[in-house]
Image: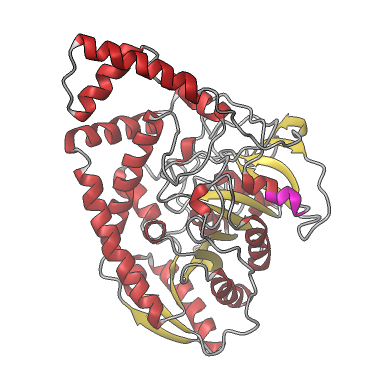
Amino acid sequence: MSDSDPLRAVRTAAETYGFDLDDETADGYVTELTETADLFGTLDAVDPDDDPATDVRAGDDAHNALLYTFSLSPGDGPLAGVRLGVKDNLAVAGVPMTCGSAALSYTPAHHATAVHRLHEAGGDVRATTNMDEFAYFTTSETCAHGPVENPTVEGAVPGGSSSGSGAAVAAGSLDAALGSDTGGSVRIPASYCGVVGLKPTHRSVPRFGFVDLAPSLDHVGVLAASVALAGDVFEAIAGPDRLDLSTWGQPTPSVTVPDAVDGSRVGVVEEAMADADEGVEAAVADATEALGESGVAVDRVSLPTFGATPLSGLATAGAEFARLLADDGQVYGTGTGYSEGLRAALADLDVDRLGDNVTDQLIVGGALLETSGGRHYVAAQRVREAFVAEVDDRLREYDALVLPTTPTTAPDFGAVTDDASFVRTVSHTLPFNLTGHPALSVPCGAADGRPVGCQVVTARHDEATALALGAVVESS
């Protein structure tokens, strides 16, 4: 929470930047601070003018996937008749937003840009979906509203953190749902639940009205019942937004999916195939065989830095999340935009009600920043730079990279209990949050009766090729 004592604020700022102020000089800065604050206080906050949802009710479904249901009076458009949900960290006007936490109490007065665009496209936006607390886990077991069940595998987790979005689509309660993806949180539930999950190019979908976990890694993405629908929803929500300066300069996509993939070249990532469980590797190998039968040239390729990327990503996420919460959710520079209401809610976060996982991450992440001076973050970015270069090099040779979305199928509840098991859940997805490339997870069969996802990664802003190759896997 911000400091309301002007003299202490001046002293703290001087100490931060290495200045030694005497009392008289400090008092002078207090006067200047007060005058400047009064001047800037004349700036009017500008919020979107959205009609709030009506008939807001607590969700009641068999898998605990839906947090709230509501009505938004859908109009006409390309998504007319499509039943849609949005993750609980995306604002819907008039619907309480908790980010899966008992510590946050906030009802937005506006829609997130992505939600607004769904509504404008005629979609029937009707529910918010449960999630791991502050999007910082991969199984749904940290959600303050109770775990979400996997509709396709009894006793198994649905994946996370977009747990409710994946489960609701898999159960048929929704046709598609928005999720967020910091380290795989769209693609992991897609893989575990046997649905389609698209993490688009970084910054291609505006994040205004979205609660970040780690801004340099966060993507708003789509879970859907089919590859085609995932593309339609992405096309509706993507493109530059004046409320999110990080999207400026990004193209507005027109997702024209090629009719045929004949002549395309695909590289299958050796390190990921070797890392996957036997049944997962076999299902993805079958998917690549189907691509070959469709006229795609399939080779094996190496990404030598692949194995180091999960730790790089976790170090990045830990530092950015700790800093974000310390600043009450404010992102500076070309970060995403927030309303005054959401900033106030994060400033008043009831930390005593945070779950153990988020508490641990904040304390460790914050302490690491203090003790290392951010050196571990810089080291993580060096690994990131090396991996980005490797992926960019491969995608100059190939139209796509293919690998298992997750190295395992959905674990049982209670199986992901230590750092090693957690890291394994994100080990194939988090690498492409570091690079920002689009990545599509498509069901490609099963191993021991549990769904397997095949991940297709393409050049930035080439979601169309990922969708075209994914459609071949889907039809096979």
Number of marks in picture: 0
Left or right position of 91 against 421: right
Residue 70 forms part of the magenta stretch = no
Q: Nearer the viewer, residue 442 or 80?
A: 80
Q: How is the image coloured?
A: secondary structure
Q: Residue at x 19, y 17 (%)?
A: 21
Q: Quadrant of residue 163?
A: top right
Front residue of this view, candidates 454 and 468: 468
**Quadrant position of residue 91:** top right
The quadrant holding residue 392 is: bottom left
Instruction: Name which residue lies at 67% across and 51% down.
Output: 171
Locate residue 469, reporting x and y percent: 56, 76
Q: Viewed as shown, does residue 317 lie left or right of 105?
A: left
x, y (%) of residue 299? 39, 84
Q: Is residue 274 visible?
A: no
Side (left or right) of 17 relative to 88:
left
Q: Is residue 152 left or right of residue 11?
A: right
Q: Residue at x 54, y 36 (%)?
A: 338
Specify start and end residues of the magenta stretch as a single range: 117-121
Residue drawn at the location 44% of the way across and 67% of the way down: 404
Q: Is residue 30 above or below residue 268?
A: above
Where is residue 36? Give x, y as percent: 42, 22
Image quadrant containing the C terminus: bottom right
Q: Nearer the viewer, residue 349 or 445?
A: 349
Question: In this rendering, does residue 325 appear at all?
Answer: yes
- Is the magenta region chiefly helix, strand or loop? helix
Spot occupied by residue 359 in the image (x, y as percentages of width and height): 36, 29
Q: Classify 266 as above or below 457.
A: below
- Decide: is 78 above or below 264: above
Locate the N terminus and report the quarter of the image it occupies: top left
